Every structure is written in C-alpha cells, then in structure tokens.
Amino acid sequence: MDIMALDHRYIAQTYNRFPLQITGGCGSLLQGADGKEYIDLGSGIAVNIFGINDTAWKEAVKTQLDKFQHCSNLYYNEPASVLAKLLCEKSKMQRVFFCNSGAEANECAIKAARKWAATHKGEEYYNIITLKKSFHGRTLATLSATGQEVYHKDYQPLVQGFLYAEVGNAQQLEELLQTHACAAIMYEAVQGEGGVMPIGQNYADAIQALADKYNVLTIADEVQLGNGRSGCFFGYMNYGLKPDLVSTAKSLGGGLPLGATLFGEKTANVFSHGDHGTTFGANPVCCAGGISILSRIDEKLLKGVRKRSAYIIRELSNAKGILSVSGMGLMLGLEIPQPARAFAQKLLEHGVLVTTAKDKIRLLPALNIPMEQLKQAVQSIKHCAAE
C-alpha cells in the first residue's frame, strides 16, 4: 500500500510533508518505513517531551482507558481534577479550563480577557495587543491575533479588535495603550513560528509594567514553550513575569490532544456557568496522560534541559555554516545561509529530523534526549552546515 499516494489523494494538503513515513520507535529514535532509524530533534513539534513509546505515559493512558474513555463535562472525572491541581501548583495560577489544542486555549484566553475588561472597565475595552511576528493559532480569532500578514491573506475580514506591537519598542506599546481601549497584552516569551526569537528581558519588563500602569491583563502563550521546554516550567518564568492568563497545549497531553487555559487571581472567577464550554476538553484519557507528563517535570529534569541547551548553543554558535543560534532552553533556532527546508531535508538524509521556522532550522528535542544521541545529532548538523 502506497501511504504517500493515499495521503495525497484523501487528506487535505495543508502540510508540505517530508518524504518519510514513521512506523515506530522509542524515546528520541524513530523508525521509518524505509528501514532506517532517525534521531528526532522535533518531538512531534514540541509534543513528545519524553519521546515516543514512553512507558509511564502509556501505562497511565491504558489504565484510564480500561475504566472509561470519555464522559461529559456535566459530570466529574478524577484525572481532570488531579491534572488541574498539578497545573495550578506548578504555575501558581488559580483555575484551569481544559480544551483540545493550543488554538482553543488561546481562544479561551481571548474570551476571558474580553469578558474581564467588559465587566471591570466597560464593553468598549475589547482590544488585545499582540506582537508582530507572533503566532497564536489557525482558528479565525487566533489567526487574527497572530501578528503576521502572511497568515491573514485570503481570510478577510479578520476578527476585529487586535493591535500589533513591535517587539522591543516599549514606546509604541504604550502609545497603543494610550490611544485604544484595551483589554490585554498577549505575548510569547519566545516567538516560535516567528523565527525562534526571545522577546528579551527589557521588553518583558515593559509589558508587565505597562499592563500594570494601564490596568490591562497579560496573556502568556505557552503552547510551544511551556511544560519545561524553556528550562523553567513556563517560559515567562525566565523573565519573572506574572501573567493573568496562560495558554498551554502540545506537550501537555504527551501526544494526545489536550490544551488548557490557566486563570490567575484577577481572572479566576471571570467565567460562570455557560460562558464557555467544550465536548472533548478534560477527556479523562488525555488528562491521565497529562498527569504522567506533569508529575515528572521537576527540577532535575529542568536542570537537564538547561544542560542540553547549553551544550547545543556552545557547539553550534561558532560552527562553520551557522550564522547564529537563538531561542531558550530546548527551543532553539539556527540561522543558516541556505534554505531551511533544503537543509532539513539534507539532515533527514543524514538520519536527523528537525523542523523549520521561517528561514531558520528549529530544534525541539525531547527534554530527556540521551546526551549521546544529542551529540551525534549535533555533529550531523555541524557536518551538513559545513558542506
């Protein structure tokens, strides 16, 4: 059976796939239908933070699956409550709304911010400032929140009420707050799809200070960077920020679809019965997997993330054919003087899987990738870059 032909015929062609079919693997080693083994530095785009076929995660999921696979949110289920408690304890937030994806988590945060502003400031305070080069999802509202025109083309009219600020320009950010009735400022500590660029401590401080000054909420989009990848539990913690709303997904379910919006002290009670909802959010099987993931994100793991990050940066920062390394923790971008897609294909042929972000190579390995495998992959990157 030609799987690629079936894909091209029956699946909507929204992804420009690499010519590789994954058939199995363990940890950070994936097996292809071609019989070859690949070191995975993409982890399913920041999803499989403990690699694939993780034993503890599989056991947690199977145990819950043997009990029941789904129940309505009209009833209580234990895995959802336990996972919500874990999230709040690790983030110091107050409440959680579970959904299925990062875009949904951001939609929820946007709704919560607008309701908070309407209640506390007035219905005209609906504008949300996001950052240029940001990415917040592919639904119409999160697409509108995304500060990249390339994603807006062909989808007009966009959802109204989003303003875009230049990263690093605190004066412009304040001018937007002065001239528009705003509900919130929304940011990624590291702009993933925008080129793996950290917003920087000074601008992060400005966001917090201006939000306090103008009484607007802050929303931290931690969909890609969250759950340990930055070297802290959430990326904003590296800057000492205290957001009012946080979105997370990707790695949260360990490979099953699970997203969450976290509410801080200001926003903990913004929603009441009927204000928001979901059919599949808080699915007990997904939440059981999430408990397995979150319960293992501890200081020992985070220390390992920082160690691996430092190794990659040290090895590649001055390597031939690599112009710069950006990012945070194990979300790193490599600037190279050749097309990123072609370079990723070259690495695939050398047994290493990576992703791209704009014109950069993006590295998103499992947080526990063995050092020997990481070293082998880094050497392959250096070899391909030097050619």
Image: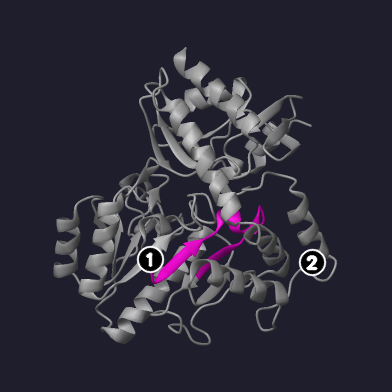
Residue 312 visible in the picture: yes
Pick whichever, 255 or 205, lies toward us. 205
> Disc 2 residue type?
Gln
Q: Is residue 271 above or below residue 84?
A: below
Percent x, y of residue 241: 36, 63
Pointer 1 residue = 219
Circle 2 sits in a helix, a strand or a loop, which is it?
helix
Residue 162 visible in the picture: no
Percent x, y of residue 277: 55, 77
Percent x, y of residue 230: 48, 49
Percent x, y of residue 3: 72, 34
- Determine which of the numbered discs, if any, sits on residue 228 in the image: none
For the view shown, which residue lies furthest in the top direction? 387
Pointer 2 residue = 64
Report whether 354 appears left or right of 72.
left
Q: What stretch of residues is rendered in magenta?
A: 243-261
Pick whichever, 356 or 83, lies toward us. 83
Report whether 306 appears left or right of 376.
left
| Pointer 1 local density, CA inside 10 Å: few below 14, some 14–19, many at least 20 | many
Q: Is residue 76 magenta?
A: no
| Pointer 2 local density, CA inside 10 Å: few below 14, some 14–19, many at least 20 | some
Residue 35 quadrant = top right
> Disc 1 residue type?
Ile
Circle 1 sits in a helix, a strand or a loop, which is it?
strand
